[in-house]
Amino acid sequence: MKRTNISSGAPWENLVGYSRAVCIGNMIEVAGTTAVVDNEVHCKGDAAGQTRLILEKIKAAIEEAGASMRDVIRTRIFTTDISRWEEIGKVHGEYFRDIKPATTMVEVRKLIDPEMLVEIEASAVMMGQMNWDQL
């Protein structure tokens, strides 16, 4: 199977050794994604705003891999303040209300930057490219 690494262009991808997303066959795994653009945390103090920006970044990576948000089967949401779950969940629902991927939301002590309130991972399967004979 062909492997495609999708880069966000972040300078630390090479330093740490990771990709924004990896596509192998019909599977796409999107790495933990935060509201960082050009090395700056956006939407500081705004959990919903960070969630929206993160999901747009995830959407771009998934689309670059040839899929759509409808192909997302799982999300993992990490937040530094679980009391803000409704703000985060409402935005998640805007993107996934009809798709309903398996989802986990957990509180973590902290993320890499104290201004980061949310980090999200996603998994997708491109059903249109599924080879049912391989199952």
Image (spheres, rainbow, N blue to C red):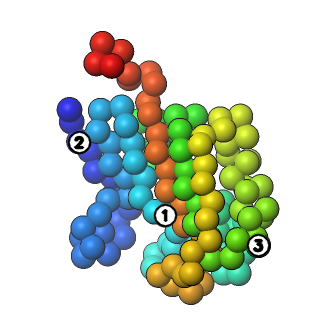
Please tell me which residue is depicted at 23% across the width and 42% down the height of the picture: 3
- Whether residues under marks 2 and 3 lie with C-beta atoms below 8 angstroms apart, the answer is no
Q: Secondary structure at mark 2?
A: strand
Q: Which residue is mark 3?
A: 83
Q: Which mark is residue 33?
A: 1
Q: Nearer the viewer, mark 2 or mark 3?
A: 3
Q: Which residue is mark 2?
A: 3
Residue 105 quadrant: bottom right
Residue 16 to residue 70: above or below: below
In the displayed structure image, the side of residue 10 where residue 109 appears, left or right: right
User: What's the residue type where badge 1 is placed?
Assistant: Thr
Q: What x and y, as percent, mark residue 9?
A: 35, 65
Query: How many angstroms separate mark 2 from mark 3 (CA)?
Result: 39 Å
In the displayed structure image, the side of residue 25 where residue 73 appears, left or right: right
- Whether residues under marks 3 and 1 lie with C-beta atoms below 8 angstroms apart, the answer is no
Residue 4 quadrant: top left
Q: What x and y, as percent, mark residue 25?
A: 29, 32
